[in-house]
Image (spheres, rainbow, N blue to C red):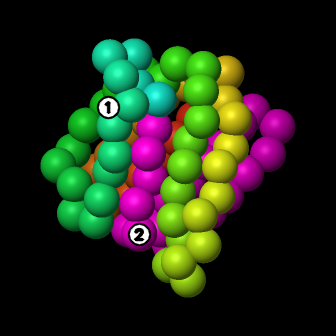
Amino acid sequence: MTLKIISAEEILFEGEAKSVTLPGAMGSFMVLDHHASLISTLTAGNIVYVTADGQEHTDEIGGGLVDVDNNVVSVCLY
């Protein structure tokens, strides 16, 4: 799947990912390849994602929104 993590100032990550774990308003959740479409708010916490080469990355966020559609995960940070 394609993961895009974007803030108002910059693109933090754009590329292929195997999984992404997000801090949702109702609890943490994981998105895998071909996940069902969804839109959710995000709270302060960590985004953890595994890139196509198997490396795990963690970014601390203050909140935002995520849109999952057609195997593209778009994270917009506050």
Q: Residues within 10 Å of mark 1 (few under 14, many from 20)?
A: few
| Residue 41 coordinates in the image, percent (x, y) | 42, 21
Relative to 31, 43 lies left or right: right
Q: Between residues 68 and 24, which one lies in front from this camera angle?
A: 24
The N terminus, quarter of image: bottom left
| Residue 11 coordinates in the image, percent (x, y) | 73, 51
Residue furthest left as drawn: 36
Occupied quadrant, residue 6: top right
Relative to 33, 67 lies left or right: right
Please provide the residue range marked out in magenta: 1-22
For disc 2, the marked residue is: 18
What residue sits 44% from the left and 45% below the top? 21
Q: Which mark is residue 39?
A: 1
Task: Tell me the kind of residue under disc 2.
Answer: Lys
Structural distance between the alpha carbons of marks 1 and 2: 19 Å
What residue sits 64% from the left and 58% below the top? 57
Q: Between residues 71 and 24, which one lies in front from this camera angle?
A: 24
What residue sits 52% from the left and 19% below the top? 43
77 vs 59: above or below: above
User: What secondary structure do most residues of the magenta stretch adopt?
Assistant: strand
